[in-house]
Amino acid sequence: MQKKYSIFFLAGLLTFGAVQAQETKVETNTFSVVKELPITTIKDQGNSGTCWSYSTQGFLEAELMRMGKPEYDLSDMFVVSHSYRDKAEKYVRLHGKLNFAQGGSFYDVIYVLKHYGAVPEEVMQGLNYGTKRNAHNEMEQGAKGFLDAIVKNPNKELTPVWKKAFNAIIDTYLGELPTSFTYKGKSYTPNSFAKMLGLNADDYVSLTSYMHHPFYSKFALEIEDNWRWSESYNLPIDELMKVMYNAVEKGYPIAWGADVSEVGFNRDGIGVLADVEAINTAGSDQARWIGLSHSARQQEILRLINTPDCPEIEPTQEFRQKGYDNYTLTDDHGMVIYGLAKNQKGRPFFMVKNSWGEAGAYKGIWYVSEKYVAGRTMNIVLHKDALPKDIAKKLGIR
């Protein structure tokens, strides 16, 4: 999954002057916290499609805090580097018939933890190209161009050194993978550091909710960035929501994969499954709508989205499936759910940690409505102990 920045802006959002005189003051959301779990600081993925790494590492950092461990800042680029190497090998084995891009999945991080270990952020920051923030486009395109040349097999037989050459590209940008390091006065390897952390990769499960596979079975989610073909358990959406509420209430954070291309997921820290048609219908009879241009109406819609009683779509199982089938529900962004809140009208929201720096009204935190979560969740990852017992039994998870 990787963030697609252009989706948040409707045509004409910069045209503010046309509506200033016709705006009426509207009430905006205010939130009260119902349950809040500890998380680490807000990070910034910069100009890179690595939300999958930032969100899962943030999730694991929150898991460590849940376990009573100190606060850690785990290296995101350690995971990215290993994932590029593994992805390159599969890309070549499949003769280029695999998505090779910056995106990834939660499972990539869990896989790296299990097979390669972990390192602190200070040991591998991955900024070997002279900037203070990630900028991965050149690396991605250069690496893919190299692999495409290899796949063409110009020698009619691949040499045994192409992997070494590819790894050199990744190392040039992200730095060499550490084999040993010192952290707080102690020496570690990546595997010994992971062992010290005490995280068991096998304790984490992925859940989703779609109708094209049997419920209570497992399947590989058919999305481009699931290049490892990892499997998720399939639940009806009402049971998936039950899992999510149960997890937070019991103190377990959640790695949340979602589509954030909806107009209701804005840059101000709000996510609602806005019923734009209902907003338009309600507004058409109001004086403030008379004479507004199309772009001004779009701006007004965005303003109304931040109201406490913004109309929302009812996210049925069929609604989710239709979105998945017609590409309006896509693998778009990874975040961390760490709390529950309500607005002044009693509408339930999930508290979400993002990786866009301290953006928005809540400095990197988003309040996402229950309906948005139900309607636009792609998959989640959480500790298996967070599952309600009846659902764990249905899935055969112990």
Image (cartoon, rainbow, N blue to C red):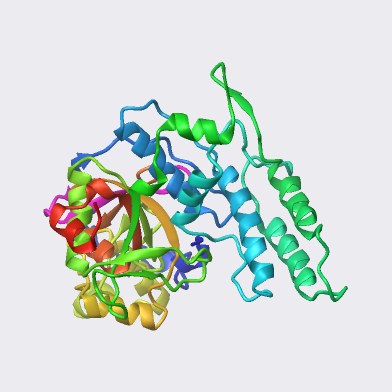
Q: Characterize the magenta stretch by its predominant secondary structure.
A: loop
Residue 262 pos. (x, y %): 37, 69
Kindly indicate the quadrant of the structure image that contains residue 157.
bottom right
Q: Is residue 354 visible?
A: yes
Q: Residue furthest right?
A: 155
Position of 38 relative to 100 (above/below): above
Kindly indicate the quadrant of the structure image that contains residue 364.
top left
- In reply to whether residue 243 is colored magenta, the answer given is no
Q: Is residue 33 visible?
A: no
Residue 12 pos. (x, y %): 47, 71
User: Over which residues does the magenta segment extend?
Assistant: 342-361
Count up the numbered dots.
0
Residue 312 vs residue 292: left or right?
left
Residue 318 pos. (x, y %): 24, 80
Residue 350 pos. (x, y %): 25, 52
Residue 51 vs residue 101: left or right?
left
Residue 91 vs residue 380: left or right?
right
The front one of 31 and 95 is 95
Q: At 27% across and 78% down in the image, what residue appears?
A: 211
